[in-house]
Amino acid sequence: MVKPSMFYLDIIHKIKNRIKDDVQIPIAVYNVSGEYMMIKNYVKYLNEDINYENEIITELFKSYLRAGANIIITYFAKQYGLYMKKLYDKNIIIDDNSNNNFNIELTL
C-alpha cells in the first residue's frame, strides 16, 4: 500500500514495473485525509459545485490507475460511488451495510 498516494505516483509506477507480468499482486493506494481535505477546500475556495469536485476526483483516480494501482482506498468512496452509480447504473454494486465501511465494486 502506498500512502499518501497523490504525491507518489512515480513510486506506484516503479512498483508496478518491477512485478512480473505473470504475477498478480494487488497495488493499493490510500488517499489520506489531508489529500481529501485539500480537494474539498480547493472546490470550496473556487465556489464550485459537487460536479466539479467529482471531475477532479475522477482525474485523481485515473492517475492512480495509470500509475499501476488496482485498489483505491479513499474518503471519497461514498460520494464517488453514488456519482458513478448515477453515470453507470448497471455496473455499480454499493454495499453500505458493513459496519461503517462503504464498499464499491465497479466493473467496466
Image: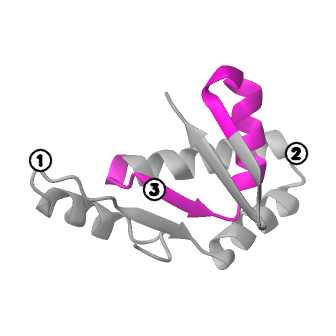
Identity of the residue drawn at 73% across and 32% down: 85
Identify the residue shown where x is 40% and y is 51%: 70
- State left or right for residue 34 relative to residue 107: right
- For the magenta stretch, what is the residue range? 66-93
Measure the alpha-carbon separation of dots 2 and 3.
Answer: 27 Å
Question: Disc 2 or 3, which lies upstream in sequence?
Answer: 2
Amino acid on which the number 1 mark rests in the picture: Asp
Q: Earlier in the sequence, mark 3 or mark 1?
A: 1
Q: In the figure, residue 15 lies in which quadrant?
A: bottom left
Q: Quadrant of the N terminus?
A: bottom left
Question: Mark on residue 21?
Answer: 1
- Compared with residue 41, is residue 60 higher up or lower down, i.e. above or below? above
Instruction: Name the residue beneath numbered marker 2.
Output: 49
- The alpha-carbon separation of the residues under discs 2 and 1 comes to 41 Å
Q: Which residue is mark 3?
A: 71
- Secondary structure under badge 2? loop
Q: Residues within 10 Å of mark 1 (few under 14, many from 20)?
A: few
The residue type indicated by label 2 comes to Asp
Q: Secondary structure at mark 1?
A: loop
